[in-house]
Image: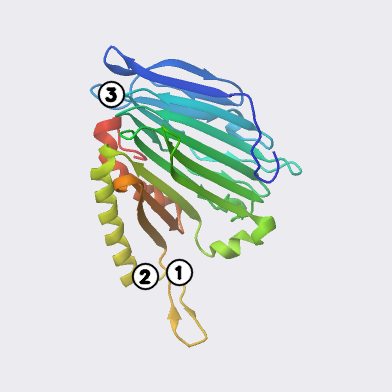
Amino acid sequence: MRNGEEVKEKETGSVVVEKVGGRSSVISCISRYPLKFIIPKKVGSSKTDAVWVYALNFGGGIVSGDNISCKFSVGDACTMVLTTQGSTKVYKSVGSKCSHQILEATVGRNALLAIIPDPVTCFSTARYYQKQVFTVCSDSNLVIVDWITSGRHESGEKWDFDLYKSTNNIFLDDGQPLFLDTMLLEKEKIGCIKNHMQDYQVIAMIVLLGPNMQYIQKLVQDNVKRIMSEKLQHPSAALNHQRDKADHFMTKPNFMASCSVFGPKKIGLLVRVASVTTKSVYKFLQHQLAPLEPIIGVSPYR
């Protein structure tokens, strides 16, 4: 793989969740180096019908040239959560080698798949490409959190990687595209990434899709509207004012968020976030996704 171009690889891991005895259950779980899945017997209340899957990488992160490909299947009326135990570290690139991770998931009728990992952190010179492709039914439910930090601040690295490309595509089961999104940060094409990002150290994308997510979507939209109204009225003093040519003061908030709907009957919500701190994004995610707790057992990012 070179410059974020996809190459075919052997499947590294797969998980199949189906109803067994009236409860969501893992009927198949396969993982191979460098990927490992951990599936705890219980997360949250025993009354909650949800399977939690933790994805781990041997060596504590993704090594230059790693090729990871995994598939997930969530059966009708089942619930599955895919998460991590910490940020996904992408180590320095060896030469022009690019690491990549491909995820394919199928979500059944009235089922829920929640992808709620910690952020990706790319080391200096790292080259990383990830692609997530979801196939859903008209009444499937999907939560996707996809986010990246600027790097290892303690080592003085801020947006110092060479390539980061993240693609998220959602298709209906008849092949109709519902949501197509790609973020590309490439030093070779745009120059110094840090200059473009200015003071912002975290970029996040959240997708909420499906009939069972409508209530949460409305809450998130209202919260984002309120947050941005407050931020724009009272910008943070932490970000310095800069005088423009017209001798006016230009300000930018230390946290920004926006919402937009997509799909038939506005079935999906897209939230984009930019922030100067990782902590503030964790706090935002905790608050906005807290209503998932009765469905998945615990509040995400608690």
Graded by Cα atoms within 10 Å as few (under 14), some (14 to 19) or many (20 or more), the crowding at tag 2 reads some
Residue carrying label 1: 239
Residue 291 vs residue 15, the one in the foreground:
15
In this rendering, the count of numbered labels is 3
Check contact, mark 1 vs mark 3: CB within 8 A: no
Q: Quadrant of the N terminus?
A: top right
Tell me the tag on residue 254. Answer: none
The residues bearing labels 1 and 3 have C-alpha atoms spaced at a distance of 44 Å
> Which residue corresponds to the image point at 45% horizontal and 28% vertical from the top-left?
54
Check contact, mark 1 vs mark 2: CB within 8 A: yes
Which element is circle 1 on?
A: loop
Point out residue 90 in the picture as x, y percentages from the top left corner. 61, 41
Residue 104 vs residue 272, the one in the foreground:
104
Residue carrying label 2: 235
Graded by Cα atoms within 10 Å as few (under 14), some (14 to 19) or many (20 or more), the crowding at tag 3 reads many
Three-letter code for the amino acid on which mark 1 is drawn: Leu
Point out residue 261 in the picture as x, y percentages from the top left corner. 34, 52
Tell me the tag on residue 49. Answer: 3
Which element is circle 3 on?
A: loop
Q: Quadrant of the C terminus?
A: top left
Point out residue 62 in the picture as x, y percentages from the top left corner. 61, 35
> Which residue corresponds to the image point at 59% horizontal and 65% vertical from the top-left?
195
Considering only vertical position in the picture, is 257 above or below 91? Answer: below
Three-letter code for the amino acid on which mark 2 is drawn: Pro
The residues bearing labels 1 and 2 have C-alpha atoms spaced at a distance of 8 Å
